Amino acid sequence: MTEPAGTATGTLSFGPFTVMPHERLVMRDGVALPLGAKAFDTLIALMLRPNEVVSKFDLMALVWPGITVEEANLRFHVAALRKVLGDGKDGTRYIATLSGRGYCFVAPISRVELPAQRRAARRTELPPVKLPNRLQRMVGRDDEVAAVSDRLIGSRFVTIVGPGGVGKTAVAVAIAHDLLETFSDAAHFVDLAALSDPDLVITSILLMLGLPAQTDDPLPALLAHLRDKRMLLILDNCEHVVAAAAPLAAEIFHAAPHVHILATSREALRVEGEQVYRLAPLAVPPDKPGLTAAAAQAYPALQLFLERATAGGAQIALDDANAAIVAGICRKLDGMALAIELAAGRVEAYGLEQTATLLDERLNLLWQGQRTAPPRQKTLQATLAWSYGLLSDIERLVLRRLAVFAGHFTIDAALEIVPDQRVDRSRLFDAIDGLVAKSMVAPRPIGAMMRYRLLDTTRAYLRDVGPDDASLAARHATYYRRWLEQAGRTWATVPSADERAIHFSALHNVRAALDWCFGVNGDAGIGVTLAAAAAPIFLAMSLLIECRRWSERALLAIDPSSRGSAEEMHIQAALGLTLMFTRGGSEAARAALSRSLAIAEARGDAPNQLQLLGRVHIFHERMGQFDAALGYAQQSLTVAETLGDAASLALAHSLLGVSLHLAGEHRDALTMLEAAWHGPGTERISTVYGFDHRNRAGISLAREFWLQGRPADALQLARQTVIEAAQMDHPITLCIALIWAVSIDLWSGDLDGAEENIDRFIAHAESRSMGPYLAVGRGVKGELAIRRGDSDGIVTIRACLRELHDAGYELLTTTFNIALVNGLLALEQVEQGARLLDDTISLVDQSGDHMYMPELLRMKGRVLLARPQPGADQAEAHFVQSLELSRRKGAKAWELRAAIDLAGFLAERDRREEAKRLLQSALEGFVEGSETADIRIANALLQTL
């Protein structure tokens, strides 16, 4: 196709339609149809090639010459065109779609000639355009403009509703400019914001249309003038004159069938014919760790902030480091366009970080905007004061009280907290209805329940409007304490992050209540009980630093008469766990956990005693006190048996299975871990108490599979537990799964898989400030370096071990020592390796992680052979000890390694048949088809024998 769409000449017709290309009109029975400019261009482009397939690429090039657009734009305008033409109704067909090829105009076309005087009359009666200038570039509103335009063309009367500063006027003006050609430049913008008298609404419209406004009853004259006109009428800022604007818009809608009305308001007009479009704030990046600059730039709120900051003179190079800062600013401002523009204007003076800090400390409602902005939009203060002034007295009172909520709240919460002798329940319902209608309170469904929230800017304004209400704050804190206590009973049965999100939606309110309770004029007594009830939710979300902070504040504020209470038990337990994960095996962590367990025992509280035994168990494991941990695990089984329920037994089986696994009692460990992974009640071993015990049992079971000769099952189960842990969105559980999955990768010789998993581990440990885990991650990086022949890994592991010793984290000391010995042997530093190995064997004897003893004995044999004067007999004895211990404990993987080293030793001494039988025996215990680095080495050695 060579002829541009706009060069068609003459008047065309098809079916009942007449097309006048030069006047850009499509008429049916003498009435112009509401067709957008691009839809009209699309029609002409297709009509110029009737009965030919026009590819979508040719069509887009003709309709949008010189501009690259998405295919969705073309589909949108083809759909609009079909709707106006009635294409497909009653069997009529004008435009055919050929899948994968394009579109084809299939109706017969003829040329006609309209009388010249008729065309001239149409041109002279069209009133001129009277619109404000559109924004040079409007960010993030293309979909809204298209959706409202489509609805306006189809239904004729649309009201854009939203809070002040969200961008309603900008969207309306953009729509009007886009539809100018559709209405042949007959578009009128009436700004009602400056009116103080509702009676002046009709006068403003008359003056805009150039009509006299002096009659006592101007309505009939206005309707008579509009009755036969085709135009777009924009009524901007109707909220403060809604009593007059709403009935007038309804009258025009019914009396003038070709007039299309686009209104903007902070509440709907609520008249017949109106279609309401609620304009949402600009999308903001989610509050999640690991946000990259590339991902952040996809969000319109961030795009607007960067554009306005740059326009104001700021120099911002967005990168992964500062993307989170900008995203946080946009979230703080709820994606509100005006607020974002005002904040962006401060960056040139304060810088990015200081602007964010100022917003965190207090939203500045008096920052100045553009000089040309309407008075109500020069500052956020003015915008909010405008909205607040439109409310009734009862709505203002209720809104001030609703400001006690931070984030979302339910109607049930409002009914419990807001009412008193001044506001009863029925008046509260009416007020909330009015506040939602006036865009002061935003409704949002979460799960099956509707929730509500005030924007942060609105809450900041309301804090300056009325005095603090201590009784209201106390009711708020007490309500959320009761809510947490009730909801906490169900968290153990909520496995997925999406399901838990419904429970966690109240977290902002919990934080706000805690801030008040422990503040200057708060109620510390309520704060202590609230902190105890909130601890499980903070732990379930791995918010360790926050949980530790509130627990410490609560313990400082606790009344002496409350010592030994259930509240102190829960707070001490939370403090101990958070200290353990963030600072390692500190004495403070031990003291807190011991105190909590002692309270549970003194109170005869068996359920909490069991949960606390689980925490004390893992604490001693992390301290490297494996025999002590085993004792606590055995004690947990005793307590679980007295309770008798399946979930308690599953928890105890998990604890005991992990301890037996680390103690090298592989057959008993397998039984316990399978019961904790597959048995009844396992689905209720939850993250409420810090981590998911079922998942921990699963990854330990995967390690047992590997050790007992089932490597394929081990890898499959390890992947499953990591996937399930990730789906929980619980970093502690995921870190536990990942670090044990890394051990299986390393045992199997999959260094790339180990590196991928340890990188994930480090990222999640960083996101929750888990200091000991970060040191562990660096240690594994050192082991990988040694495996790849890089001696720098020795330095890395030594530094890691120093950090872990300082933190009291000894869970992985043996594994890192083994890696270090391998590195020293590679550098032929045999005596250093020998001393470290002897120290490690002594440490294992003392602490109880006997799982590694076969490996240590095998390595002792290798060290003896590596000395300048090899001790062959002693080396063989150690290989045999390793082999026999592995067989006795059921560790086939360790047995194979010992067999490989012993077979090599025997082969060098011409005992090849003995070596061959040894290897064949060791390989027989593996599941058929098993494949690991050790199995490959064994098979290769067999080939040489």
Image (cartoon, grey):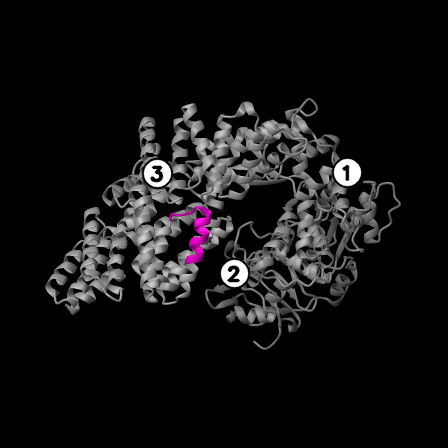
On the image, the x and y values in percent for residue 667 come to 23, 44
Q: Are marks 1 and 3 in contact (CB under 8 Å)?
A: no
On the image, the x and y values in percent for residue 556 come to 58, 32
Residue 722 seen in the figure? yes
Q: Residues within 10 Å of mark 1 (few under 14, many from 20)?
A: few
Query: For the residues marked 2 and 1, what is the alpha-carbon distance in whole angstroms?
Result: 55 Å
- Amino acid at circle 1: Gly
Circle number at residue 628: 3
Specify the quadrant of the image occupied by residue 847: top left
Query: Tag 2's secondary structure?
Result: loop
Q: Is residue 249 left or right of residue 921?
A: right
User: Magenta stretch?
Assistant: 798-811
Q: Is residue 233 left or right of residue 482?
A: right
Residue 33 seen in the figure? no
Residue depth check, mark 2 versus mark 1: number of the one nearer the observer? 1
Magenta includes 803? yes
For marks 1 and 3, the one nearer the N-term is: 1
Q: Quadrant of the C terminus?
A: bottom left
In front: 787, or 65? 787
Question: Which residue is painted at 36% across and 67% down in the image?
Answer: 789
Q: Is residue 337 left or right of residue 213?
A: left
In front: 600, or 16? 600
Of all residues shown, which one is farthest toward the right? 214
In front: 802, or 506? 802
Q: Residues within 10 Å of mark 3 (few under 14, many from 20)?
A: some
Residue depth check, mark 2 versus mark 3: number of the one nearer the observer? 3
| Residue located beneath label 2 in the image | 93
| Residue located beneath label 1 in the image | 389
Residue depth check, mark 1 versus mark 3: number of the one nearer the observer? 3
